[in-house]
Amino acid sequence: MLIVMRKGSSPQDVQRVLDLIEQLGFRGHAIAGTERQAIGITGNPGPVDPALFELLPGVAQALPVTRPFKLVSRELKPDDTVVAVGDRRLGGGGFTIIAGPCAVESEDQILSLARMVKEGGAHMLRGGAFKPRTSPYSFQGLGERALRLLARAREDTGLPIVTEAVDEASLELVESYADVIQIGARNMQNFALLRRAGRSKLPVLLKRGMSASLEDFLMSAEYLLSEGNGNVILCERGIRTFSQHSRFTLDLSVIPVVRRLSHLPIVVDPSHGTGHRDRVAPMARASLAAGADGVMVEVHATPDRALSDGPQALLPAQFTTLAAELREMALVLSRRPEVVS
Amino acid sequence: MLIVMRKGSSPQDVQRVLDLIEQLGFRGHAIAGTERQAIGITGNPGPVDPALFELLPGVAQALPVTRPFKLVSRELKPDDTVVAVGDRRLGGGGFTIIAGPCAVESEDQILSLARMVKEGGAHMLRGGAFKPRTSPYSFQGLGERALRLLARAREDTGLPIVTEAVDEASLELVESYADVIQIGARNMQNFALLRRAGRSKLPVLLKRGMSASLEDFLMSAEYLLSEGNGNVILCERGIRTFSQHSRFTLDLSVIPVVRRLSHLPIVVDPSHGTGHRDRVAPMARASLAAGADGVMVEVHATPDRALSDGPQALLPAQFTTLAAELREMALVLSRRPEVVS
Amino acid sequence: MLIVMRKGSSPQDVQRVLDLIEQLGFRGHAIAGTERQAIGITGNPGPVDPALFELLPGVAQALPVTRPFKLVSRELKPDDTVVAVGDRRLGGGGFTIIAGPCAVESEDQILSLARMVKEGGAHMLRGGAFKPRTSPYSFQGLGERALRLLARAREDTGLPIVTEAVDEASLELVESYADVIQIGARNMQNFALLRRAGRSKLPVLLKRGMSASLEDFLMSAEYLLSEGNGNVILCERGIRTFSQHSRFTLDLSVIPVVRRLSHLPIVVDPSHGTGHRDRVAPMARASLAAGADGVMVEVHATPDRALSDGPQALLPAQFTTLAAELREMALVLSRRPEVVS
Amino acid sequence: MLIVMRKGSSPQDVQRVLDLIEQLGFRGHAIAGTERQAIGITGNPGPVDPALFELLPGVAQALPVTRPFKLVSRELKPDDTVVAVGDRRLGGGGFTIIAGPCAVESEDQILSLARMVKEGGAHMLRGGAFKPRTSPYSFQGLGERALRLLARAREDTGLPIVTEAVDEASLELVESYADVIQIGARNMQNFALLRRAGRSKLPVLLKRGMSASLEDFLMSAEYLLSEGNGNVILCERGIRTFSQHSRFTLDLSVIPVVRRLSHLPIVVDPSHGTGHRDRVAPMARASLAAGADGVMVEVHATPDRALSDGPQALLPAQFTTLAAELREMALVLSRRPEVVS
C-alpha cells in the first residue's frame, strides 16, 4: 500500500498517517519527492483497506501496490534516486565511471593504478579486498590490508572507493574504510548479508545474480531499502545463458526496464559481463547508449600477471581512450556533462 | 584449407591453384582482397596436405583452417564484406537503418509508412509478405500481393526492399520483387532453404536463431557462402534465456566477437529482440555503440491495430527521433557519415 | 471454440453443427472420443458466440478454448491418442522402443543393426537418410539409397521405419518408403514443412526445438493437426541451457505437463538429448519413469567409425541390456506389457 | 596432485608423504579407500613435481589432477562416499527418501506430518526453520522454535532431521539440533557459509545453485571437503532456463555425470525443481531411474494453507503411494532394499 499525500500537506498530516500505520502493526516509510510526499507501508501480511487512510487530512490517495517490490518501485517514488558518494553523485542524468583492478595486489599496484585511472577519467576507484572465488584454492584477496591500501589511494587521488563485502565480518571492515559497499552476484540472495548492508550508512552497489530475474534483483534491493538504506546502486553484470562466446550474456535491455520500474540508478560491469578485454569497450559504450547511469570496468597495468581475472582487464591506455569516447557520447546523448567530465 | 597468394601473383597463378583443387575433387573459392588474393577450399572430407599447394608459383601459404567455418572467416578474408543493396552499401564502417512495418497490410499502409520512414531517415524498407507464425491460426501475410506493394513503395521512395522468404516457393517470389532476402530466426537451420538462398543473386539477411550459438550462426552463413552467395548480412535478434522481462535477450556482445571472427556485416533487430516499443530506441543506440553495421526496426502508424507484433513497433515520430540520435552518435563514433545521413 | 456433443447424439446432429461452422466461414474438425463426440472450430478470427451452437440438437456444450492450441488439446479430446504404426501401437499406456543408427551408412550396417535391435527388443527402427547438419561440409546422408535400404531392413525384420524429412522433396521420398515421418528439432518451426507433413497419410514424429517453449512445441503440432493429420508423436530431445556437462539439457518434466495438456503421445530421445553414450541408459530409464510413451535411442556396432554422432550411440549389447531393464521397469510401473514385450 | 599408495603400504609410509607435503608448505589429505590409500595435495599454487614423491617408499604413483576439483573427485577417491546420518546410510547403492513440510509451522503440523511420512516410508524428515525468501515481506521461518519442534519430531519418530542454515548464526543453531545441515541453492556460493559448514561435524546437504554449472557445484562441495568435512550430499534442484512450464528445469542428466566424476552421493529435490504437485511423483521416479541416491520431497496435510510453497507439496496419501512405487522400482533396479525399506 502506498499513501500519496496532497501537494501542500503538512508534516502533521504525514505524522498522522505514520501513527495509524504503526497502530495497525505495520511499518511506514516516508518518501520525500520534489513535488509531493508519499508513505509506503510494508509488513502488512495482506491487502490493507484504502478507506482507512483516504479519510485522513492531507491524503490524496491510498494505492494498493500490486508488484511484489514496493520501496524500490517508481510508483512509490517517481523521482530518480541520486546516490551521493563522497562529493560525487551517481544517477540523475550523469554518467559515472568506476575503474580499477579486479583485486588489490600490492601498494605499488593500487597506488599507481589509482593515479592512472584518475587521470584517465575515472570518478571512483574499484578494487577487491575480499574475493569470492569458485575454487577454495584460488587467491581470495588481501583482506584488511587491501582496504588500508585503498584508503591510501583515496587520500592520494580523491577517488571514492567501491569494494566488495562477502560476509558480516568483511562488511564491517569495508564499512570502516570504503565509500560504497559492493554485494557480489553470488551473494545477491544472501539475505542475511543484505539485511546487514541495509543497516549500513554507506551506499550499496548490488550486483545482479547470474540467474536472477529482474524481479529477484529488485526484491534483493528491496531487502536493503526495507532495512532503511535507500542509497542503492543496481549493477548488471551478465547472466548465464547457453551462449558461450562470452563468459556471461550482458542483458542490457534490462536498463530501460529498470528505469521504468524503479527509481534506483543502474550501472553495468562489462568486464565481468564479457570476460574478454576486447569486448569491454564496445559493451561499455553500449551501456551508456542504452541509458545506464555508469559503468564499472577493470583496469590493470600488467593483466598477464594479475592474480585474478586478468584477461578481462583493460590496459591503462585503453581505459583512457574508452573514457574519452564515453565523455563525447554522453554529450551527444544529453547526459549531464559536469558529472561526466 | 586456405591458400594465400603472394602480393602480385598473376591471374594464371590463381587459376593453376583452382585447377589443382578441382582435380582433387574439392571446390575452390577465389576471394579477392584489397591487398592479396586468397582461395578457400571446401568439400575436402579431411585435412589436405599443404605441400601440394605451397610449391605452386604465386602461393604464399597454405593454411589449415581449424575453425569449422571457413568462407565466413576473417582468416580467409581479412577485409570487411560490404554488401551492395541497390545504390546503398551495408557494412564497411557506415551505419544502415532499415525500417518499416512488421507485415504489409494494405497499399495505403505500406506506401504511407515507406514515405514516413524515408523522410525519417531510413536507408532501406522492411515489410513482411510471408510471416512465419507460431500459430497456424494467426495472420500469415498477404504473400505476392504484399511483394507487389513493396515494389510500388520502392518506386515511390527509392528505398530498397528487405523481406522474408519462408520456403522455396516464397523465395522465388521474393527474388523477383525484392532487394534483400531475409531468412528468419526459425529457419536459420532450414538447410534446404539456406542452400537455395545461397544460389540466389540477391543479398541475404540471415537472422540468428533464438538458440543458436555463435558457431551455429556462422555455420548457417557458411551454407550461403558455400553455394556461392557472398553477400550475407548477419542479424542478431535476441536469444531465449530465463530472463523474462523482455521477449528475448538481445546478445549485443556477439557484435565484437563476430567482428573479430568474420568479415560479414552484422545488424541488430531490437524490435523482435525486445518485443516492447519503449526498449527499441535504447537498444538501437546500444547496437550502434557496440559496433553494429545497422539496425532494423519496426514502425507502424497505428500499432494498436497492427496485424502482427504491434506492441514492438515505433510510432513514425519516435522513429524520426531515433534516426536523428543515431546519426549524431555515428558522427561521434567516427562511423562514415555519408552512409549514415 | 469446442462443441461437445451429448452421449448418444446422432451423426445428423454432428453434421448440422459442421454445416453451421462452414456457413460461418470457419473450419470444423470432428473428433471421435470413446464416450462422446466433439467438434473443434478453427479459423475463427476471434471469439465465437457459444449460443449459436448450444441451441442445436445433440449439443451438450460450446466451450471457448482459451489456450492457443486447440486440436492438440486434451480439453478438445480427453482420450489419449494412440498412433498406429504398421501393426504396432504407440501411446495409450504401452512403452515403445525405437532404435537404430543415427545415419544409414551401408547395406551391411543397416541390415545387421536392424537384426540386432530387433533381437535386443526394439519395436521400430530408426535411421537417417537425410541429415540436417550444422556444417555444409559434414556428411548429409545417403538420401533415397538409404530409404531403399531401410525398406529392405523392414522386410527383413518386420520393424516399422522412422526417418527424417528435411524439406518437401525428401518428405515425398520418405512418404513412399517409411512408416513414420520424423521432423527434426531444427525444423520444428519450418511451417511450410509442417503443413506438408500435416497433409501426409503417415504418422509424424515431431521433435521439440532446442529453444521451444512447451507452447511453441504444441503449436507446431497444431499445424500438423490443423491440416488433418492427427497421428502425431511428440519427441523431447533436450533444450539449450547454460549447463554444458551434456550437449543439451533433457527436460523430462515436460512429460507430465504434456500428458495433462494434450492427448498426443510423447517419446524421448536421450541420445541426442545428452550426446554421451554413458548417459543414454540412465536417461532412457528416467524417461519411462517420468511417464513417456517411448524412447528413441541410437545404436551402432562400431560407433568410433560412425559417420555422425558416434559418441552418443549405444553398442548393441548395451542396447539389449537397456531394453531388458525397460521391460522390467514397465511391468512395475503398470505399463501395458504386450506393447513392451 | 594425488599420491596413490601401493597396496600394503604402511602407516609410516603414509606419514612420510604427509610430512613432505607439509615441508613443501602444502596441505595433505589422507583418503582411506577399501583397497588402497591415497593422499590428496591442496594449497599448491601450481604444478608439483611428481618425482618428489614417487621415490618415497610405499608410493605407487603421483598423479597430477587436472580438473579444478580435487577432494570431491573420483580420481582421488574411487569408492562411493556413504554418509552416515543417525543410524541411516545415504549413498552406496541404497535409495533414501527425505520428506516433510517446506517450513515448520506449528507443533501439531510437524509432529503429525513426521508421523505420516514415517509411516508412508520416509527415512529422514525435512522441515525449514530458517527460510531464505525472495521477498523481505514473506514468512521467514520460526527459527529456533522450529528447530526445537523438529527435535521433538525426531524423538517421536526416530527420523533424522535435515534443515537449512542461512548464515553463521543459524548454522550454529542447526548444528545443535539437527542431523544434516542443508545449504540452499541461493547460498551455494556463499563461501563464508561453506567454510563454516566445512568445519562442522554434521553432514551437509548442498543444493545446486540455479545457475551453477556442474563444475561450480563440485567446487562448492570442494570448499566443504577442503575444510575437513567429507560427509557431503549433493542435491539437484533444478536450473533456470527459458522453459517456463515448470518453475525450474530439473537437470537429471547431471546424475550419471556426477556419478562418474565424484564419489559423493547425489539426491534430487523434485518439489522445488518443478514447483507443481502433479510433477513431483513422475520426477521422483525419474530421479531414481537415473541413478540418484535419494529424493527429498515436500509433504503437507493442507497445502492450500501452507505458509510457503504449498502448490508443490504432496498430500500425505500421495506421498505414501509414491514411496511404495519407489520401493518397487528400487528392487527392479537392484538398489539395496534394506536401505529402501
Image: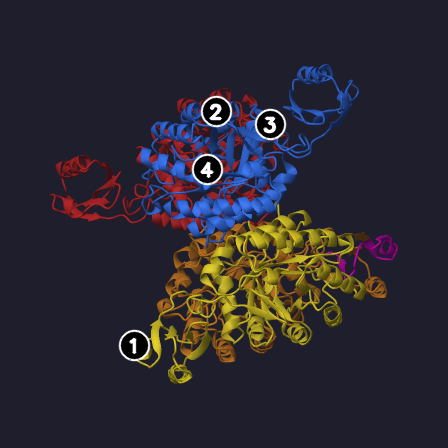
Chain colours: A red, B orange, C yellow, D blue
Residue at the image position 48 percent from the left and 49 percent from the top: D281
- Residue at the disc numbered 1: C51
**Contact between labelled residues 1 and 2, with CB atoms less than 8 Å apart:** no
Q: Residues within 10 Å of mark 4 (few under 14, many from 20)?
A: many
Q: Chain of mark 2?
A: A
Q: Amino acid at mark 1?
A: Ala
Q: Which residue lies under the disc numbered 4?
A: D186
* Horizontal and vertical percent position of residue D67: 66, 35
| Mark identifier at residue C67 | none
Question: To which chain does the residue with label 1 belong?
Answer: C
Start-end of magenta stretch: B33-60
Extreme residue toward the right, this view: B55
Residue B207 vs C197, above or below: the answer is: above
Residue B91 percent across, percent down from the top left = 59, 60
Q: CA distance from mark 4 to mark 3?
A: 22 Å
Real-space Cα distance between discs 1 and 3? 72 Å
Whole-angstrom CA distance, mark 4 to mark 1, is: 52 Å
Tell me the number on the disc at residue A150.
2
The mark found on residue A137 in the picture is: 3
Q: Secondary structure at mark 3?
A: loop
The spot of residue A307 in percent (x, y) is 60, 29
